[in-house]
Amino acid sequence: MQQQMKPELSFTTSLVTDRKAPSQSRYTFEEVFSEAVDLAFSTLGNKAKQTLICYMEQKLGVEQCAIGSDLEAFSGALEEVFGQATQLIEVQIMHFLHMKVPRFEYAATGSELSFLNYVKAFRRFV
């Protein structure tokens, strides 16, 4: 009897922060992060995206214009809304961050990829 293998999501990258001069960045972290979040939320559909943004602002106190300045609050709000499915949205956000700045590379320490650690490393890079 053959055992079925479960597909795995894996990343093999490394953090390299010296590939750009500080003046080369055309975008601020807040702009890039906000756009990545917007794109990730857009994958849910426009009405769902608007409802999610409204809920996060009114019920959880996470303002759309300030999501990049308080990553812990934003991450907690995602967890509050999506529960165990939070990682799906986080992976989408990381994907869109990488699409915007493809030169950014990140290596997770240990076997688990942390959204907050990834985004904090991205902030230092940009």
Image (cartoon, rainbow, N blue to C red):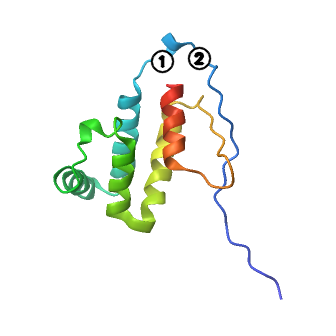
- Residue tagged by mark 2? 20
Can you give x and y, in whole percent of width and height, for residue 92 in the image? 47, 50
Residue 38 occupies which quadrant of the picture? top left
Q: Residue furthest left?
A: 58
**Residue 25 shows which numbered tag?**
1
Q: Amino acid at mark 2?
A: Lys
Q: Are marks 1 and 2 in contact (CB under 8 Å)?
A: yes
Calculate the distance from the C-alpha at mark 1 to the C-alpha at mark 2: 8 Å
Of the pair 94 and 121, the residue shown nearer to us: 121
Can you give x and y, in whole percent of width and height, for residue 70 in the image? 34, 40
- Name which residue lies at 39% across and 49% down: 40
- Name which residue lies at 64% across and 46% down: 108
Mark 2 lies on a secondary structure that is loop
Mark 1 lies on a secondary structure that is loop
Can you give x and y, in whole percent of width and height, for residue 11 in the image? 66, 49
**Residue 100 shows which numbered tag?**
none
Can you give x and y, in whole percent of width and height, for residue 73 in the image? 33, 48
Q: Residue furthest bottom?
A: 1
The image shows residue 26, relative to residue 108, as above or below, that is: above
Q: Residues within 10 Å of mark 1 (few under 14, many from 20)?
A: few
The image shows residue 87, relative to residue 102, as above or below, that is: below
Instruction: State left or right for residue 13 relative to residue 90.
Output: right
